Image (spheres, helix red, strand yellow):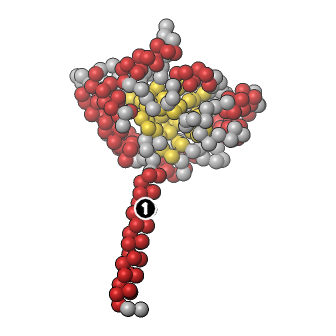
Amino acid sequence: MSSRRALLLVLAVAVAAALSAALLVRDESDSATETQFGTTVRVRGGESDASAVERLHREVGTPPIVRLFSSTLPAPWPRLTDIAGSADIVVSFKIAPSEVLAGAADTYLREWFASAPTDRDIYWVYFHEPEDDIERGAFSAREYSRASDRIARIAATADNPRLINTVVLMCWTVGGDTQRRVASYLAAEPPDVLAWDCYNAAARDGEYASPDSLFKESVAASKRVGAKWAIAEFGSPLVGHDDGDRRARWLHAVAAYAEQHQAEFVTYFNSTVGGDFELTDQPSQQAWRAIMAG
């Protein structure tokens, strides 16, 4: 082989290797988690579902993902999708583990999962924040995890890949001095997503907690069990004499942290339940509108 042909062959191999590496980098980038940002939809007393949605859109925009709650069996899909529009859904429901284990909810849940939409991601959550209920003796961690497993098996019969098994725990469980073990709340198979409810406890000191101090333990806990990490609820009242500018900067800092740590989703708890977390000031509303819009 002439030296010229040998040189051309070396160059061709080098170019092919470079192209292969470029494609690999592009593919890895394409497969990276793109965090979705959304909010709860809360229907106030006297409001219809439609007026609650209209108010939310007017105040903070149209969320690409919404957080919905059912206090017992999950609400029928027509109502959930009417509220959510075309958005992805994080929906939780609560049924006593003893009822689940007795099969009392099997028929309803089987039909509910079977009729779930297939055009969006649905993060379904059985009994969010079970820790305090377990601690006060309403049911045991074993009963909860066994009930979770039973529901997961029912969901699997729907053969819908857009149904995403999600467990929601409190950040306090891993961030406080609670001696709680995350594994005790999980079924035999870990959930697809281990999401967290985290609130700004520093508000009582007139501060907005840094995102790292607020979320780092939950990020690590989700990683340890092999699940994706998400924030199902977070929020803060306005602190001190803040007119909303400081909270707006904090919201942007939380969003940046969530993206950096590849959160599956982040839904702000835009509500006055348990505290005044509602985004009523213009800076906070504009910040979350921009974050949701990407």
Number of residues whose C-alpha sits closer than 10 Å to that of mark 1, classed few (under 14), some (14–19) or many (20 or more): few
Left or right, 290 with respect to 183, comes to left
- Nearer to me, 56 or 169: 56
Q: What residue sits 65% from the left and 27% below the top? A: 95
Q: Residue furthest top?
A: 46
- Nearer to me, 268 or 236: 268
**Type of amino acid at the residue the image marks with label 1:** Leu
Q: Quadrant of the N terminus?
A: bottom left
Left or right, 74 with respect to 41, comes to right
Q: What residue sits 43% from the left and 17% below the top? A: 54
Element under label 1? helix
Q: Which residue carries the number 1 mark?
A: 23
Q: Quadrant of residue 242?
A: top left
Q: What residue sits 57% from the left and 35% below the top? A: 119
- Nearer to me, 240 or 70: 70
Whether residue 241 is situated above or below residue 164 in the rendered picture: above
